[in-house]
Amino acid sequence: MKILRLGLLLLLASLQSCTEKERPTPPILVCSYDWLTNPFYHSLPEITDSTGLYKRPAYKLAKSDSSLYLYPTSSSPGEFEGGWWELIEIADCIEGKVYYPCARIPGEKSYLGFDPGKHTDWNQSDPELFPYENFCIATTWNSSTFTYKYLNDSTIVTSRGGATQAGVSQEARAFFQMYLSLLHNKTLIIKQHMNLLELRTPDNVILRFYK
């Protein structure tokens, strides 16, 4: 009976959602901007939890500043290559939790891309959904496009945006929805250092990326 109960518990643990996770190895939660400049946080290896659902990617601190924006290709100005910001972790400083990107599908990553140009015509098709002229794209299995504008040098306000949903697992979809809920209809504080980027929400949740 005890073996059966233990097996059931292990099965339930393996089926947990990508929006819930074990606490990873330290640092468990970093809520200050020290992460951007503290060398300790830049030498951590890739971390995957015991379920294999979540992965914190390894990265290196660059020696020079990175552009916030995507790089348009010379042949097709509307197409982009490189310059994507890869999600490292989501730190919820109120709940005291850290979420790593879902890693259920090998090779899939969570990205954020800022379009370098303003598109006054793109948002005319649905001004309620895309009221601003700057566009941003968030991806992880599925993708979402939303608009934003600057309130000052370090603060942006984002629009509701729209998402493209593909056939993915329930845990992948749950992570995607959490990721987007932190980016859509928010006032975000942007902090950047070299190739590291932080977006902080009014609820003190920090999305961390690297390029």
Image (spheres, grey):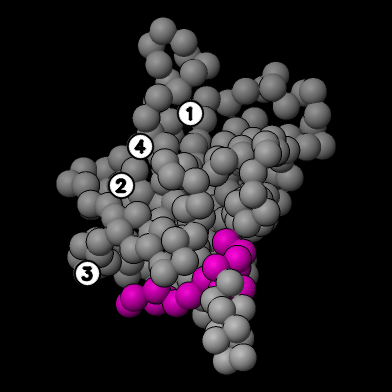
Mark 2 surroundings within 10 Å by alpha-carbon count, few (fewer than 14), some (14 through 19), many (20 or more):
many
Residue range (magenta): 12-29
Give the number of the mark in front: 2 or 4: 2
Relative image position of residue 110 (x, y in whole percent): 49, 46
Answer yes or no: is residue 28 visible: yes
**Real-space Cα separation, disc 3 to disc 2, in angstroms:** 16 Å
Residue 195: numbered disc: 2
Callout 3, which amino acid? Phe
Badge 1 amino acid: Pro
Foreground mark, 3 or 2, reads 3
Marks 1 and 4: in contact by CB < 8 Å? yes
* Relative image position of residue 170 (x, y in whole percent): 67, 54
208 up-or-down from 65: above or below: below
Look at label 2 and name its amino acid.
Answer: Asn
Q: CA distance from mark 2 to mark 1?
A: 17 Å
Q: Which residue is mark 3?
A: 40
Q: State the quadrant of the C terminus.
A: top left
Kindly check if marks 3 and 1 are in contact, taking CB atoms under 8 A apart as contact.
Answer: no
Q: Quadrant of the N terminus?
A: bottom right
Dot 3, how many residues are within 10 Å of its Cα: few (below 14), some (14-19), or many (20+)? few
| Residue under the point 45% across and 23% down | 80
Asked if labels 4 and 3 touch by Cβ distance under 8 angstroms, the answer is no
Q: Which residue is mark 4?
A: 67
